Amino acid sequence: MATIKDIAAKLGISSGTVSKGLNGASDISEPMRQAVLHAAVELGYKPKNIVNKASKKVCIFVQNMNYESIDQFGYEIIYGFEQEALSKGFQVTVISANLNMQTKESFDTYMLRHGYPGAFLLDFELHDDYVTQMHTTKVPTVLLNNHVPGNPHVGYVGTDNYEGLKDITSHLHELGHRNIAFLNGTKNSMITQKKLDAFYYAMKEKKIPIRDKLVAFGHYNIDCAQEFVPDFVRNGATAIICASDFIASGVIKVLHSMGLRVPEDVSVTGYDDLPIARFLSPALTTIRQNRTDLGKSAFLLLDALMNGIAISRIELCPQFIARDSAAQVKTLGK
């Protein structure tokens, strides 16, 4: 394992200067500090408190996800993570990882500089700087709904989308629907691709034709529905599967504005079972992700990685929730 002397030898500077760079001393230039940190990462240096497991703190990086109130997707995930971490004696810091922060400093040097032995990344897209750095990092890290194959230091936690989409599709199939649309989330996201693959798989399993005009990428919010729902209806959709409850709430709103009834004219389903799902009109048929358990599982996975146990992924079982937004397909002439 690399030492301060190894870093000093690599850079041709004194051990004292290296120590200042690692400990954030004020009497060292920023370029020198960054050189020290980059060399430390390259050589695999770890501070003594991390080596001795005295650093009982971890962090959560949040990119775009809202988490301040219980109605928001990230709230229970962070709550579950914090509860599990506290039970193991760890303190948790939540950090907003905007694009400027990711450009300014690499993930590894940030973690080294702040003495975090592990991290949990929430709501990052595949092209984000920190996600691309996951291929080479040696810092134990857990990603929500993103998977980086081949790195034993990085794990993935999520919900089994194949089971979730299969349950939704089977339910609509039993109700007689054959023209089923799918309004997905943001395109540059692994979870979006997984949901699309799961939708295709579920449709093929039920021998339901997949029509390109009934599949679209939107965004994980209510506003994207207006762009796609009218075309879905014109192309004969009798049911619309949505990749999130927020998308579904927007779809219901647009259908109502078009003078269509849910579920009498068009059935709508969501995904996540956020608190809003039961209060929509009609109440939303959806797939429940246990977000508290997702958070707890994320810390358990991170704890394993920090102890040298290379676990690739943990996927939780989804739960189908039948409410009022899906019904028997409308028969021609009725």
Image (cartoon, helix red, strand yellow):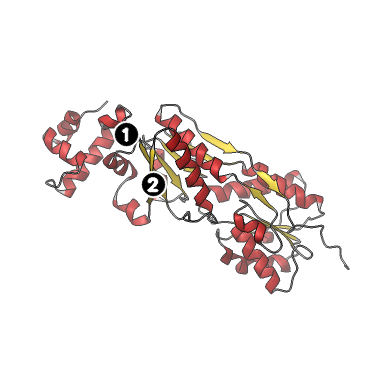
Q: Does residue 120 show up?
A: yes
* Mark 1: amino acid: Ser
Q: Nearer the viewer, residue 174 or 186?
A: 174
Q: Residue at x 63, y 62 (%)?
A: 249
Q: Quadrant of the N terminus?
A: top left
Q: How far is mark 2 from mark 1, CA to CA?
A: 22 Å
The vertical placement of 252 against 122, above or below, is: below
The vertical placement of 172 against 110, above or below, is: below
The quarter of the picture where residue 141 lies is: top left
The quarter of the picture where residue 259 lies is: bottom right
Name which of mark 2 and mark 1 comes first in the sequence: 1
SS category of the residue bearing label 1: loop
Q: Nearer the viewer, residue 44 or 292?
A: 292
Q: Quadrant of the C terminus?
A: bottom right
x and y percentages locating residue 101 in the rendered image: 33, 53
Q: Does residue 44 show up?
A: no
Give the class, few, some or many, for how many residues have Cα within 10 Å of label 1's Cα (few <14, many ≥20): some
**Residue on which disc 1 sits:** 55
Q: Residue at x 40, y 31 (%)?
A: 306
Question: Is 323 left or right of 159, judged from the image as shown?
Answer: right
The vertical placement of 18 against 51, above or below, is: below
The vertical placement of 87 against 172, above or below, is: above
Q: Residue at x 44, y 37 (%)?
A: 85
* Mark 2: amino acid: Tyr
